[in-house]
Amino acid sequence: MSIRIDEIPNQFGTKAVLLRKTWCEGRRVRHKTIANLSGLDPAVVDGFRAVIRGGIVLDDPRKAFAIRRSLPHGHAAAVLGTMKRLGFRRILGRRAERSRDLALAAVAARILSPASKLATARALDPETASTSLGSLLKLGPVAGNEMLDMLDWLLERQPWIEKSLANRHLKGGNTLILYDVSSSYLEGRRCPLAAFGHNRDGKKGKMQITYGLLCAADGCPVAVEVFAGNAGDPSTVASQVDKVRKRFGIDRVALVGDRGMLTTARIRGDLAPAGFDWISALRTGDIRKLLRSAAPVPLAPEALVPDAVAEITGPDFPGDRLMVCLNPRLREERRRKREDLLKATEETLAAIAAAAARRKPGPANRDQAMKAIGREANRRKMEKHFEIAFTDDGISWSRREGRIAEEARLDGVYVIRTSLESASLGPEAAVEAYKSLAAVERAFLAMKTSRLRIRPVHVYSEDHVRAHVFLCMLAYHVEWHMRRRLAPILFEDDDREAARARRSSPVEPAKVSDSAKAKADTRRTPDGLPVHSFTTLLSDLGTLTLNYASLPGRSDSRFLLASEPTELQAKAFALLGMDPDRDAYISMTA
């Protein structure tokens, strides 16, 4: 015998809802109506159906199930979902092993909440987890020593990982590679890589390391190398040439670096013998040589057209193409700043002169004034623009107007230098390529500030420091891809082509598209959703929780239940190519 609810059509075109008892008598099936439920609310009828199937009736909805634990989940799912789409697990290593999963978790944790390796282990361990990251990766208990072992494994895998990234992002006949160098200080015990930096007074400061970052032309990081803290920027170029040629297997390369990096010595000693092309800029001293050059024609800053590119040649740079640009906004800003610094230096000189006038005239007074000048007058690097005379009574000074005018003549003028032929790279494109080094600076900014935090470095052995910097680079690689996809709901330009089309010259400052302006003005997307920074968006996604629940009175019947995403969270998952319902629990199992 069974009890069920049947819906039977009647002559009035509606359905009668009947609670019926059904049983068998021989070969015949008998039915008996217990109650007519047609007049009840459909929700009540559904409740009866649930009870018949074995459900229970609760007088309070809060008793439906118990939440045993809640973990911030949405941001972890978003990061792991991006890694899954990028095939990041396979990039780290093709063989399934514990170190690979820990490395995957460490990269994700660096994006979510950068911390020391011990703190990261605590955040991943089920007992002390602060997000759902460890659960999604099924890591189980995680110890701090495991994270240090993971760094050793990651450093050993670095050449193969970087080659995989290079194969994806460094393609094409003439491959532009952006390269720049930065440094970070160390705290605590001294590392063999560390060297003392220098402060403004020339005295030794904190211990620091130096690292060079290789990026694709669009700014996506592909490789990083750590050098001793006392390594000069140009001295790091040779190792990068060797890396690109031998490890990445790329023969036709144009290396883009700033003027302090790709010096003439490095070009002649490292790039030219390797057959590499390059794009850089001239130093101020080299630009002055062009002013004095007689053949074929001297550089005349007064004849330059603002926001235009003029291609010239110079006798000191045979075979090189030189693109001269004049930025009128930079010219005005430098003149204003110079005048402010000159006035501030004059105030310092006036204070020194007043102090000398109060002292007794004589050689001792002159010596004290000279010491004060040497100690204070050049703090703003402007002493070279003053003629200072010392007497027993005090000091006097005057501006070197000719030297100031000579320096001001080059305000806003910069010269791009390249070995690439005009057929493969036009003048405007060469200037644009050099300005793309700003993408490397943005990478350094993200890696060094509160986003990914290379510093402070909490490990002290040379290998662990190298692996830590590499880990931060991998985290920025994932973040770079996330930012590109999430741009429509971030304070970032999601229509770069339109922004580039608004510029009449690459010398002009970067423009923004109409959609970016609208987002900045209204703080809303065209869909009416609030616009976020990348950091605040991760915080918003973190409010989507993963809950460990159980039925009332049955603590052994535990199950996972993710909260329902908000409209903004659903939009973010859609931009990342994720389905929050499908990918909520097993973001990385496939």
Image: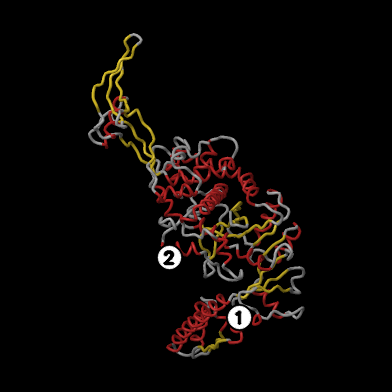
> What residue sits 56% from the left and 34% below the top?
96
N-terminal of the pair, mark 2 or mark 1, is 1
Q: Is residue 300 above or below residue 82?
A: below
Q: Which residue is mark 2?
A: 521
Q: Nearer the viewer, residue 193 or 109?
A: 109
In the image: residue 23, left or right of residue 257:
left
> What residue sits 68% from the left and 68% below the top?
427
Pointer 1 local density, CA inside 10 Å: few below 14, some 14–19, many at least 20: some
Q: CA distance from mark 2 to mark 1?
A: 40 Å
| Residue 61 percent across, percent down from the top left | 26, 36
Pointer 2 local density, CA inside 10 Å: few below 14, some 14–19, many at least 20: few
Q: Amino acid at mark 2?
A: Asp
- Residue 164, image quadrant: top right
Q: SS of the residue at dot 1?
A: helix
| Residue 106 percent across, percent down from the top left | 50, 44
| Residue 342 percent across, percent down from the top left | 51, 82
Q: Amino acid at mark 1?
A: Glu
In the image: residue 460, left or right of residue 297:
left
Q: Which residue is mark 1?
A: 407
Q: Is residue 351 above or below residue 260?
A: below
Q: Which mark is residue 242?
A: none
How many tags in the picture?
A: 2
Dot 2 and dot 1 residues touching (CB under 8 Å): no
| Residue 487 percent across, percent down from the top left | 50, 56
In the image: residue 27, left or right of residue 386:
left
Q: SS of the residue at dot 2?
A: helix
Q: Is residue 421 above or below residue 343?
A: above
